[in-house]
Image (cartoon, helix red, strand yellow):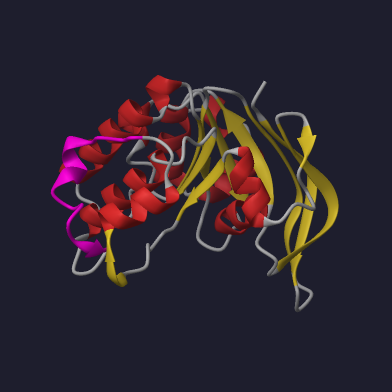
Amino acid sequence: MENLIIENLHVKIKEGKEILQGVSLEIKQNEIHVLMGPNGSGKSTLSQVIMGNPKYKKTCGKILFSKKDISNLTPNKRAKLGLALSWQVPPAIKGIKLSDLVTKIGSKNVRMEEADKLLGREVNVNFSGGERKISEIYQIASLNPKLIIFDEIDSGLDINKIDRVAKIIKKEFVDLGVSILIITHSGTILNYLKPNMTSIMVNGKIVCQNREFKKIIRVIKKYGYEKCKECTACYKE
């Protein structure tokens, strides 16, 4: 089974500050799992640690993918196993067309109508926010990933673009059984993708989990993330 299991993960940056404080999380095969939390809570750090960014030091715990301990694997080896990560702000690459990049990195012949008009342009050069997101989804889809982490994929997008991005994600990944971890602050995209599980991270810890994402969003909008620390607010509406 191609699932991701994180057990009691403690992580520091190299300067010594602990950011993740005993995170345990499971993302099952063909599951949409959402991670929400306030800014600075450790959400993006977790995504970087899953992908093996050497900036962060694991001091305790382990990361398993498809029953294999990947805690000490390099980022490229994790990518070869099927893990992929989208960036909050995908970089512009002058001199390289999107079509050339996809041909070089990808093994899957992905044809998305929404991205076809971008193929002849330099990667992310003068792209709008929505075009950058679509371009990156296109690149990731060409890799045949088994699990994707979308870090703030809905950030800076209006409702129409969020709807469009969500439809592409559903078509290219969800409908094909790819596991997904969505990291989001606002939670707007969840109305379109209907996650199986929502986890809340505050101060480097998972403080709440619930299968009914609408309950969590209502509580956050009404009280903020402080109520999530109690992990009872969803049931006291």
- Does residue 7 appear to the left or right of 46 in the view shown? right
For this rendering, which residue is in front, 137 or 121?
Answer: 121
Q: In this view, does 113 lie to the left or right of 180?
A: left
x and y, in percent, of residue 63 in the image:
75, 42
The kind of secondary structure the magenta stretch mainly shows is loop
Residue 110 on the magenta span: yes
Residue at coordinates 50% horizontally, 36% vertically from top-left? 145
Image-based side of 18 in relation to 235, left or right: right
Residue 141 versus residue 161: which sits nearer the camera?
141
Q: Is residue 186 above or below residue 236?
A: below
Whether residue 87 can be seen here: yes
Splitting the image into 4 quarters, where does residue 111 fall? top left
Magenta stretch contains residue 186 = no
Residue shown at the point (59%, 47%) measured from the top left: 79
165, 158: nearer the viewer: 165
Identity of the residue furthest to the bottom in this view:
15
Of 150 and 173, nearer the camera is 173
Residue placed furthest toward the left: 117
Q: In which quarter of the image is residue 172?
A: top left
- Examine the rendered structure and indicate whether residue 215 appears above or below residue 133: above
Magenta span: 109-123
Question: Which residue sits at x=75%, y=79%?
Answer: 15
Report the residue at 29% width, 51% height from top: 135
How many marks the image carries: the answer is 0
Residue 153 visible in this rendered orientation of the protein: no
Q: In which quarter of the image is residue 26?
A: top right
The N terminus, quarter of image: top right
Residue 98 appears at what percent x and percent y? 27, 56
Residue 71: x and y in percent read 78, 49
Using residue 152 as the reference point, say whether residue 116 is left or right of it: left
Rendered location of residue 151, percent (x, y): 46, 51
